[in-house]
Amino acid sequence: MGRRGGRKVKGKGLFHEPKHKWLADVITIKSIRGARKACKKLLNALDRRKYGRLRIGRKRALQIARSLSEAANRVYSMLKKENLKPRTRKRLEKIGEIYESAADKAYDVYHAKFVRKRR
């Protein structure tokens, strides 16, 4: 990172405390089924512009898209570990694909519905 006041500032890295607790409660890396369920829930929320009582505007739509993308990145970084069992590796690869495709869809929805077009 950069320097602040003469000292080197450390970044948070990829694994840190969640910034948005409501998204952290939905997104899971434990199972393929849970990942699919989380993606379906969040993409549905983007389409409806509502998640429970939360209204989803431009900021929250971008939060959803970024968190799905970050979940995929976390899974892919977990795959770099060498001592994973083949079954676990296969499961993580599938979960990564699920989150990556959901992130692409979320960004498409974000750009279509929430970003103002310039004239």
Image: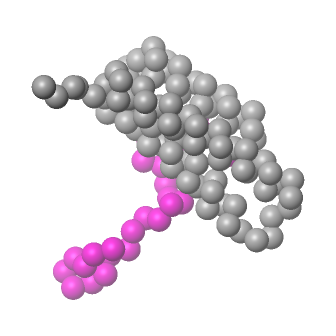
Question: Residue 118, image x and y in percent?
Answer: 16, 28
* Residue 97 in the image: above or below residue 17: above
Question: Residue 62, image x and y in percent?
Answer: 37, 36
Q: Is residue 84 visible?
A: yes
Residue range in magenta is: 1-30
Would residue 11 be counted in the magenta stretch?
yes
Q: Quadrant of the C terminus?
A: top left
Report the magenta stretch's main SS: loop
Q: How is the image coloured?
A: one colour
Question: Residue 113, image x and y in percent?
Answer: 34, 21
Would residue 19 be counted in the magenta stretch?
yes
* Residue 65 in the image: above or below residue 87: above
**In the displayed image of the protein, which residue is found farthest to the bottom?**
6
Q: Residue at x 56, y 47 (%)?
A: 71
Side of 26 where 93 appears, left or right? right
The front one of 114 and 29 is 114
Side of 55 where 103 appears, left or right? right
Question: Residue 67, image x and y in percent?
Answer: 48, 43
Q: Residue at x 67, y 28 (%)?
A: 37
**In the displayed image of the protein, which residue is found farthest to the front?**
119
